[in-house]
Image (spheres, grey):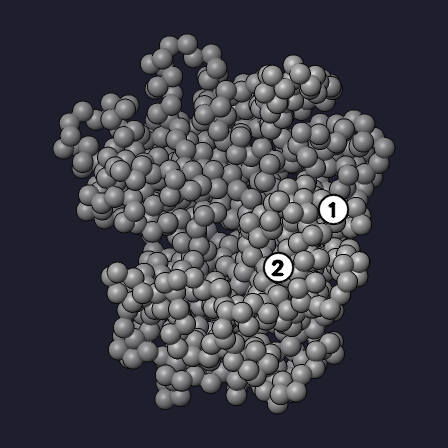
Amino acid sequence: MPVEVQGSRGQMTETSRQAANPQPHPLPGQREAGALLQVKNLRVEFNTRRGTLVAIDDVSFDIAPGEVLGVVGESGAGKSITGTAIIGLLERPGRIAGGEILLSGSRIDNLPAAQMRKIRGRQIGAIFQDPLTSLNPLYTVGRQITETIEQHLPMSSAQARARAIELLGEVGIPAPERRIDHYPHQFSGGMRQRVVIALALCANPRLIIADEPTTALDVSIQAQIITLLKRLGRDHGTAVMLVTHDMGVIAETADRVAVMYAGRIVEIGPVQQVIHDPQHPYTAGLMGSIPTVGQDVERLPQIEGSMPRLNAIPAGCAFNPRCPRVFDRCRVERPHLIAANQTQAACWLHAPERRAPDAGQEWSQGAVHG
Amino acid sequence: MAEETQPSSRPSPKGQGDSTPAAGSGRPTPATGPRLASQGGAGALLEVRDLARDFDVSRPWLNRMLEGAPRQLLHAVDGVSFTINRGETLSLVGESGCGKSTVARLICGLYAPTRGSILFDGTDLAKIAVRNDMLAMRRRFQMIFQDPYASLNPRWRVERIIAEPIRSHKLIKDDRAIRKRVGELLTQVGLSPLDGEKYPHEFSGGQRQRISIARALSSNPEFLVCDEPTSALDVSVQAQILNLMKDLQREHGLTYLFISHNLAVVSHISNRVGVMYLGHIVEIAATRMLFDRPLHPYTRMLQSAIPDITMSGKARTPVAGEVPNPLDPPTGCAFNPRCPHAREKCRTTRPELLPFEGAQVACHGIHEGWVPIRMAETIPA
């Protein structure tokens, strides 16, 4: 079912574009579309011996320049696969089975590997969860950064080294002119993640895909990295797709948020609205189940059961077996994204013929076991 | 490295038992719930005094001989004292490497302490000489581990996993009775008795953690040590497990030592919270008190570092620096290089954990009055 997300969220794009600084890379074509990255009806399949698993099903969203889009969901929801598909690093047997990915208006999902390699690093930077595995332990960090700079930008070695030092300083590494000649193991976890961020930034990409960039870090370091990501996005006008399972990180960082469940987007909208006034029962349940400091409840509201496996996604709405507000239509017909309040939710509760606001009202205090 | 330079700076083990679970806390405590007859009244169930554990991280012997390198000791836990009362939950929080998991493992006997003593129900665990007495003591406390994928034997059926403590402690002799008991345990943790026939790989992470809990409960323990039981789980599953743990605590009068790095989870589950930094407890207080009025600068820093999900837009205290190398901890207060209030005394003398207005805190500035005390600008409860 085709879903056009772009149309109805025009005003949000406007506001976030005003909030961002002027972009360093104004491109023809971008202005009309208003979006840097467009993902349309993306479908990712894994062919296995026991049949085809659909990991991403009909996912559509876009990101404006300078905007931070958060993608949240529980493990197995398909958020990382979405990011991997965009940077063209899907590994066999995974493959893009349908849909389009457009970067500044031109398709990148069907490019040959050699061309995609030029885009990766130059136009799309990537930050992964574990900074130790994304750096080569045998080379100094300086060499890894200058290599990437020289690969993508017309710079001499000396210029590249100067830029590398400048970048390391910018991501908050003390004494960058000395640290540049150190090896990854000489850095702590938080400092290593800063190096990875510098590496992702070095060719001034327009889009950064950050996949769980703070998950391996302690809270105090996580707060530093979040602040850094926010500042860099603002200063460089870089769009960020922030993939995480941590709602707190999203709330602090993102402009808009897409909530994924079983390979589909169930809700997408401005982060304030999604967090404070979720329209999909899954989002409401998810928000309720997160404990917060200062909250005084004996029991947390809980969603019963767990996310279905990819080979057993229920018919209709994938959330229907766990949903407290399920009705007949949910079991047979798959909902598409419907405008609901200020977000869009894939839920039949918001079908025009059945207006039932406040998706959260039926989350009780959870059943008692035993 | 010298073993210990400042013998005078060991935290005093005294004065820990005075905070009852409900002190300063408005929330209903599980301690008021029904209790098993065998468990008697309130009072300390576990008392830890000046507990310490060093790890030898020296180079191999030959290198030391050839290069003249000294022995190197990592003081993972260095003089930790606390008590846990019956029916309450004490949490230990801190960043990685602060020694919180080492404390859990010391209490469960997975490591032997370098120094200090652990008293369970008044008996010093180190002084139990008879093997059978030790077994009887071990039955009374169990552990739940972080990773539900690594802590269940993949080649055993769930029934055998859960029945293992029953069999090893010879609590029930008859096989049919054991099977019945396993069925009850599975029901208690929200699974079906039929699940006993399955293998661990057939379950999701949350279900596996339920199996771990069922196994821990099978010997009818009074005390559970939970080492990051929900940090490998998704948030919706985490809520299920936290609710289950609270229900079980109420039903069985259990006492928990809960280890976590997640302050929000800790604030939800515990009656009292101890904050650890580089092997020391820097602050310990009733949960409500700790979050409403954090005293130690490190506690304040941790609290302001939590991502604010309510998006209240409060200004965040910028967090600076990283945890120092535990092999070469700073002299004096371990937090002094990152502390905005640090003075000369903090760099030379290690502060002791002393009572302060109902809490206990190890900070010169708080006790001498030059660190301003302010209420946390937290979300209204």
Which SS class for mark 1? loop
Mark 1 vs mark 2: in front = 1
For badge 1, the amino acid type reads Asp
Percent coordinates x, y for residue A347 in the rendering: 39, 77
Residue at far right of view: B344
Residue in the image at 54% along x and 69% along y: A114
**Do the numbered discs 1 and 2 sit on residues whose CB atoms are within 8 Å?**
no
- What quarter of the picture does the C terminus of chain B occupy? bottom right
Residue in the image at 79% along x and 61% along y: A159
Percent coordinates x, y for residue A16 in the rendering: 65, 78
Residue in the image at 65% along x and 36% along y: B277
Crowd rating for badge 1 (residues with CA inside 10 Å; few <14, some 14–19, many 20+)? few
The chain ID associated with circle 2 is B
In this view, B48 is above or below A38: above
* Numbered circle sitting on residue A219: none
Task: Quote the CA–CA distance across marks 1 and 2.
Answer: 37 Å
Residue B358 in view of the camera: no
> On the image, which quarter does residue A125 sit in?
bottom right
Percent coordinates x, y for residue A249 in the rendering: 59, 60
- What quarter of the picture does the N terminus of chain B occupy? top right
Q: Which residue is mark 2?
A: B308
* Numbered circle sitting on residue A181: 1
> On the image, which quarter does residue A353 sit in?
bottom left
> On the image, which quarter does residue A56 sit in?
bottom left
Q: Is residue A90 rendered to the left or right of residue A36?
A: left
Query: Considering depth in this image, is A30 or A326 the residue closer to the camera?
Result: A30
For badge 2, the amino acid type reads Asp
- Answer yes or no: are tags 1 and 2 on the same subunit: no
